[in-house]
Image (cartoon, grey):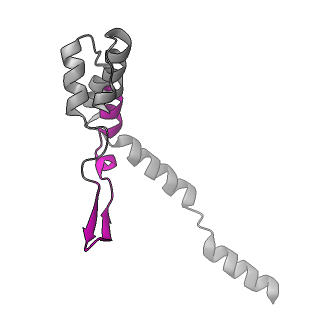
Amino acid sequence: MLKTNRRIIFSAFVNPNLASSQSINQNRNQAQVDLLQPLRQWLDSLEIQNRKLAKFIAKLIPAQCPFERDIVLFGRKIAHIPPMCKLNPLYDQLVFLRFRALCYLADVCGEDIQSYC
């Protein structure tokens, strides 16, 4: 009787079509097109070769998320708004672009970049 119950329970959890459904899901994921990929590649390939451009990028892209806030009422923190910049699909590319601009200013131009941080 115990062996019969094990077979019933085991067969309820095992799906014989699981392998075929996983392959269908993988094909669907591969078929999806990333519309932002050309923009990501362009941002990654952008070379900083100009002091004015490097300064503009360093000033334009903030060092920290400007949306993160603590809401304080009567001296007590009642809420915290988390940083939402990571929801931006181009966040990594923009941060890396800012980093390259700061590196250009520091290494090539010899500028002090602490004012940009």
Task: From the viewer's side, name the closer residue of 2 and 29.
Answer: 29
The answer to whether any part of residue 51 appears in the image is: yes
Left or right of 115: which side holds 23? right
Task: From the viewer's side, name the closer residue of 32 and 48.
Answer: 48
The image shows a total of numbered marks equal to 0
Residue at the spot 19% in from the left edge and 24% down from the top edge? 56
Residue 82 shown in magenta = yes
Task: From the viewer's side, name the closer residue of 13 and 117.
Answer: 117
Location of residue 26 with respect to 60 vertically, above or below: below
Task: From the viewer's side, name the closer residue of 94 and 10.
Answer: 94
Residue 91, given in percent of the width and then of the height, sits at 31, 39
Residue at the spot 29% in from the left edge and 33% down from the top edge? 94
In the image, the segment drawn in magenta is 68-97
The answer to whether any part of residue 40 appears in the image is: no
Residue 31 shown in magenta = no
Which image quarter is the C terminus in?
A: top left
Residue at the spot 33% in from the left edge and 32% down from the top edge? 93
Location of residue 13 with respect to 91 vertically, above or below: below
Left or right of 51: which side holds 20? right
Residue at the spot 31% in from the left edge and 27% down from the top edge? 97
Could you say which quadrant of the image residue 109 lies in? top left
Residue 29, given in percent of the width and then of the height, sits at 40, 46
Residue 8, given in percent of the width and then of the height, sits at 68, 81
